Image (spheres, helix red, strand yellow):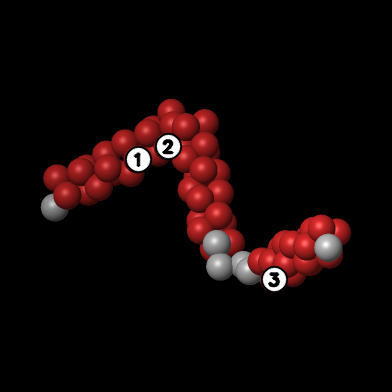
Amino acid sequence: MIIDSIASVLCRIKSHFSCSGHDDRGIGVVEVILILVVLIGLVVIFRDQLTALVNNIFGNITNDVNAL
């Protein structure tokens, strides 16, 4: 009797995990978070180069506007 109850509980647990193993609703969120982490890491690593590039671009825009 007790063994049958334990077997029944284990069977229900197994069926729950086998059904939830195919549930991929949260995968999109994980992918977005990982992409954001990589992008933030790249910005931190190349911060000086990006700052110099943006300053150069805005400097060129300012020079071209002043030339008009």
Residue 35 in view, yes or no = no
Which residue: 27% across, 39% down?
59
- Residue at the spot of label 3: 19
In the image, what residue type sits under mark 2?
A: Leu
Task: Work out whether mark 3 precedes mark 1 in sequence or the reverse, and give the earlier one.
Answer: 3
Q: In which quarter of the image is the N terminus?
A: bottom right
Q: Provide residue 34's location: percent of width, then percent of height.
A: 56, 49
In the image, what residue type sits under mark 1?
A: Val
Which residue: 74% across, 62% down?
9
- Residue at the spot of label 1: 54
Residue 34 in view, yes or no = yes
Toward which corner of the image does residue 8 lie, by quadrant? bottom right
Q: Provide residue 63's location: percent of width, then percent of height.
A: 22, 43
Which residue: 42% across, 37% down?
50
Which residue: 56% across, 57% down?
31
Residue 18 lies left or right of residue 37; in this view the side is right
- Residue at the spot of label 2: 50
Q: How far apart are marks 3 and 2 (CA)?
A: 47 Å
Residue 56, placed above or below residue 30: above
Residue 36, placed above or below residue 16: above
Q: Camera-side residue: 39 or 25?
A: 25
Q: Provide residue 42's location: percent of width, then percent of height.
A: 52, 39
